[in-house]
Amino acid sequence: MERFFIGTACEDQKCKEDLQAAQTASETAQKALTAKQNELNATKGALAAAQAEVAKLKKEAEDAKAAAAKAAEPAAPAPAPKKGKK
């Protein structure tokens, strides 16, 4: 019977070691996941800023094109005087 207890104690120790190793691995993975999530959030923020800048530049380009087109339009000729009946 004594041998059974020794064997159980060894198995319990092995289980504790395995559990500790699994917990350590889990904590490491959680930290890595948190770091990646923070990196993703920062990247999303940079993307939003870049998209806002692109939208601003597109609007400026469209406004410049519209101004250039307006300046390039020939002035409308003055209406010719109507000849009235005499």
Image (cartoon, rainbow, N blue to C red):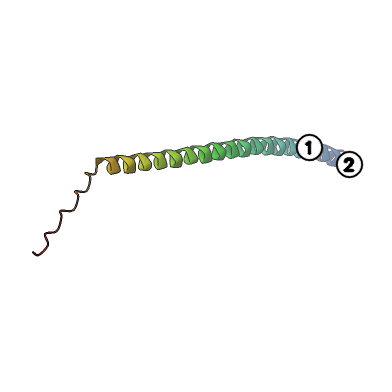
Q: Which of the two residues, 47 or 74, is positioned nearer the viewer here?
A: 74
**Residue visible at 76% across and 40% down in the picture:** 19
**SS of the residue under disc 1:** helix
Where is residue 26 drawn, in percent x and y? Answer: 70, 39
Q: Crowding near pointer 2: few (<14 within 10 Å), some, many (20+)?
A: few
- Viewport quadrant of the C terminus: bottom left
For label 1, the residue is 14
The kind of residue on which mark 2 rests is Phe
Where is residue 30 drawn, in percent x and y? Answer: 68, 39
For label 2, the residue is 5
**Residue visible at 24% across and 44% down in the picture:** 73
Gap in angstroms between the C-alphas marked 1 and 2: 14 Å
**Residue visible at 36% across and 43% down in the picture:** 62
Residue 17 vs 81, above or below: the answer is above
| Disc nearest the viewer among 1 and 2 | 1
Check the image and name the residue furthest to the right: 2
Horizontally, residue 75 falls left or right of residue 8, namely left
Going from N to C along the chain, the mark reached first, 1 or 2, is 2
The kind of residue on which mark 1 rests is Lys
